[in-house]
Image (cartoon, grey):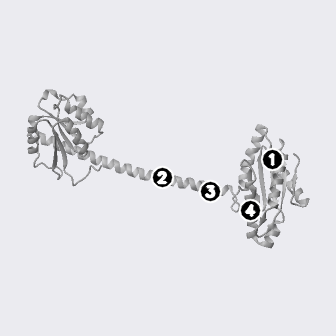
C-alpha cells in the first residue's frame, strides 16, 4: 500500500462511544489544514467497530481514541490490536478520557508509541490542535523515512540482483575458461595439459591403496596419407569420429585425452595389463571396422602397459610409448603390451 499519496487527505479516526465527542471534534477540525491537506474524519463508536474500520483504512494517520468504552480498558485493547496484531506502527495515537485519573502507565505509552494523552475537556483547547499537528507531522516524517528506506532497499536489491547476475556470468566464464584450458579444441576430449595434471594424482592413489593402474597409447596409422589424399578437413573428421568411438567404449572412470596430433592416451585406474590389453583390442577392432565418410577404413596401433611401483610419470608413459612403437614396427593395426 502506498501511504504517501499527496492527493489524499489526512485520515483521522475518532473512536469514542459519546456522539457529542464526535460532533465537537468534527467542529474543531472543520477548517483545520496541515501541509496543505485537510482531514478526512472517520467515526467509530466502539472498539469492535474501530477494529473493522482500521482494517479498511490502513492508511489512517491519526487515531483519537477514548480509553473507556465497552470496557474500562477498551482503548488500550484497541491499541494492542493495532500495534501487535496489525503491525501498524505508522498510525499516531492520541488517547482521550473523561477520567484523568485513569491515564495509562508510562510503560504502556512507550511500548505502544502513544503520542499524547488528553482530557476531553481539552477538545476545544489550542493544545489539542497542537497535539494533532505534532502527531500528523510525526506520521509524515515516518512515511518519508520509510519511503527512503524502501528506496534504499530497492536499490540494494537491484544492486544485489545485478551483482548476483555478474557473479553467475563470471562463474560461467570461469567454467568456460576451465573447459577451454583442459580440453582439445577439435575433438572436445581432454588435452595433454589436463592429462598431466591428473596422472600424478592417479599414480599417488594407486600407490596408497595398492591398486592397478594401466595406460593405453594409440595413434592413427598413416594419418599423413589421409591428410595428403583427402585433405585436412577429412583428417579432422577422422580424429573427431575416432574420439567419439573411443569415448563410447571406455569407462567413465577412464581418462581419455588427445596426446598430440593423431596420438591419443587412455589412463585406466584399477585395471591390470591383461584387462587393459583386452580393452585396447576392443577399441582397435571398433576403429578398424568403422567406415569414415571421406577416408574410408582407418586403422590404429596401440601400446599398453601397467604401472610399476618403481615408476614415475615419465617412465610409465615411456613404456607405453615404446609398446606403441613396437606395434607400429610390427606392421600397425595391432596391440602390443609393454612389460607389466
- Mark nearest the camera among 4 and 1 is 4
The residues tagged by marks 2 and 1 sit, at their Cα atoms, a distance apart of 47 Å
Task: Of the two numbered discs 4 and 2 on the same chain, state the one appearing first in sequence.
Answer: 2
* Residue labelled with disc 2: 163
Tell me if residue 73 comes above or below residue 12 in the rendering. above
Instruction: In this rendered view, identify the residue nearer to me: 294 or 330.
Output: 294
Q: What's the residue at 8%, 45% (across, down)?
A: 27
Assign a secondary structure to mark 1: strand
Q: Distance between the residues labelled 4 and 3?
A: 25 Å
Q: Name the residue under label 1.
A: 214
Q: Distance between the residues labelled 1 and 3?
A: 30 Å
Q: Residue furthest right?
A: 330
Q: Which of marks 4 and 2 is in front?
A: 4
- Name the residue located 75 percent from the left edge and 44 percent from the top edge: 202
Q: Is residue 178 above or below residue 291?
A: above
Q: Position of residue 220 (x, y in %)?
A: 81, 62
Which is in the foreground here, disc 1 or disc 3? 1
Q: Marks 1 and 3: CB-CB under 8 Å?
A: no
Mark 4 and mark 1: Cα distance apart in space: 24 Å
Q: In this view, does 85 lie to the left or right of 283?
A: left
Residue drawn where x is 14% and y is 36% of the image? 16
- Regarding mark 2 in the picture, which secondary structure is present there? helix
Amino acid at each position: 500500500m502506498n501511504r504517501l499519496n499527496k492527493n489524499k487527505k489526512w485520515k483521522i479516526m475518532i473512536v469514542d462511544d459519546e456522539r457529542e465527542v464526535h460532533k465537537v471534534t468534527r467542529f474543531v477540525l472543520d477548517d483545520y489544514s496541515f501541509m496543505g491537506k485537510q482531514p478526512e474524519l472517520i467515526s467509530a463508536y466502539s472498539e469492535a467497530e474501530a477494529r473493522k474500520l482500521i482494517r479498511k483504512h490502513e492508511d489512517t494517520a491519526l487515531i483519537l481514541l477514548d480509553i473507556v468504552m465497552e470496557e474500562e480498558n477498551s482503548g488500550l485493547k484497541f491499541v494492542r490490536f493495532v500495534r501487535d496484531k496489525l503491525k501498524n506502527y505508522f498510525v499516531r495515537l492520541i488517547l482521550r478520557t473523561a477520567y484523568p485519573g485513569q491515564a495509562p502507565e508510562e510503560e504502556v505509552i512507550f511500548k505502544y508509541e502513544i503520542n499524547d494523552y488528553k482530557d476531553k475537556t481539552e477538545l476545544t483547547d489550542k493544545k489539542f490542535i497542537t497535539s494533532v499537528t505534532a502527531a500528523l507531522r510525526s506520521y509524515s516524517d515516518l512515511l518519508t523515512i520509510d519511503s527512503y528506506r524502501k528506496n534504499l532497499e530497492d536499490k540494494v536489491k537491484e544492486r544485489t540482483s545485478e551483482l548476483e547476475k555478474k557473479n553467475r556470468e563470471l562463474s560461467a566464464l570461469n567454467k568456460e575458461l576451465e573447459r577451454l584450458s583442459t580440453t582439445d579444441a577439435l575433438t572436445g576430449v581432454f588435452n595433454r595439459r589436463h592429462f598431466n595434471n591428473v596422472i600424478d594424482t592417479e599414480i599417488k592413489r594407486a600407490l596408497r591403496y595398492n591398486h592397478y593402474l594401466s595406460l593405453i597409447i594409440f595413434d592413427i596409422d598413416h594419418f599423413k596419407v589421409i591428410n595428403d589424399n583427402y585433405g585436412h578437413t577429412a583428417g579432422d573428421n577422422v580424429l573427431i569420429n575416432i574420439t567419439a568411438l573411443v569415448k563410447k567404449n571406455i569407462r567413465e572412470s577412464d581418462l581419455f585425452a588427445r596426446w598430440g596430433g593423431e596420438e591419443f592416451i587412455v589412463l585406466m585406474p584399477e585395471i591390470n595389463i591383461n584387462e587393459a590389453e583386452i580393452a585396447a583390442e576392443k577399441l582397435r577392432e571398433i576403429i578398424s571396422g568403422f567406415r569414415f565418410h571421406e577416408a574410408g577404413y582407418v586403422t590404429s596401433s596401440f601400446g599398453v602397459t601397467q604401472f610399476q611401483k618403481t615408476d614415475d610419470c615419465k617412465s610409465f608413459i615411456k613404456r607405453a610409448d615404446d609398446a606403441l612403437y613396437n606395434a607400429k614396427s610390427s606392421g600397425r593395426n595391432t596391440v602390443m603390451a609393454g612389460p607389466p
